[in-house]
């Protein structure tokens, strides 16, 4: 068992540990679930930014019957390097069964 004096100590001057991409995705899911009180489906993208991370989160906005007609939304979430929320915004709302678009053109 390691003694307390052998463990590295963090002083208040040190930066907190930076999150890796999977941690940023998880933090974004938790922030959006808490802020919107909606069910998150998952992170659809994670990318580094100058200030931390930008994560896109898919959310069930409205449950419908059948579930294939649920209304979903994409939220863009900006996090700092430690996973704290900087900003979020809903960027898209769509029916679950609707096909994605490519280059802004609808897929039919």
Image (tube, rainbow, N blue to C red):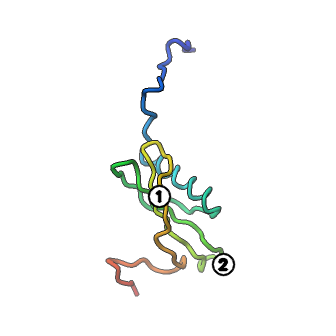
- Tell which tag, 1 or 2, sits nearer the viewer: 1
* 1 or 2: tag closer to the N-terminus: 2
In the rendered image, residue 83, in percent from the top left (x then y), is placed at 48, 46
Q: Is residue 77 above or below residue 66?
A: above
Q: Residue furthest right?
A: 65
Q: Residue at x 46, y 34 (%)?
A: 16
Q: Quadrant of residue 62?
A: bottom right
Q: Which residue is drawn at 50% across and 17% down?
A: 7
Give the residue number, with chain letter if any, for mark 1.
77
In the rendered image, residue 37, in percent from the top left (x then y), is placed at 65, 62
Give the residue number, with chain letter if any, for mark 2.
64
- Quadrant where the C terminus lies? bottom left
Q: Which mark is residue 28?
A: none
Q: How far apart are marks 1 and 2 (CA)?
A: 26 Å
Label 1, residues with CA under 10 Å away: few <14, some 14-19, many ≥20: many
- Quadrant where the N terminus lies? top right
Q: Are marks 1 and 2 in contact (CB under 8 Å)?
A: no
Q: In which quarter of the image is residue 19?
A: top left
In terms of depth relative to the viewer, which is nearer, 93 or 97? 93
């Amino acid at each position: 068992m390691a003694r307390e004096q052998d463990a590295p100590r963090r002083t208040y001057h040190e930066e907190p540990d930076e999150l890796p991409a999977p941690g940023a995705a998880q933090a974004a899911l938790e922030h959006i679930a808490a802020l919107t009180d909606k069910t998150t489906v998952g992170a659809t993208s994670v990318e580094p930014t100058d200030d931390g991370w930008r994560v896109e989160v898919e959310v069930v906005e409205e449950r419908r019957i059948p579930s294939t007609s649920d209304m979903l939304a994409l939220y863009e979430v900006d996090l700092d390097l430690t996973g704290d929320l900087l900003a979020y915004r809903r960027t898209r709302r769509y029916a679950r069964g609707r096909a994605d678009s490519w280059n802004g053109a609808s897929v039919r």
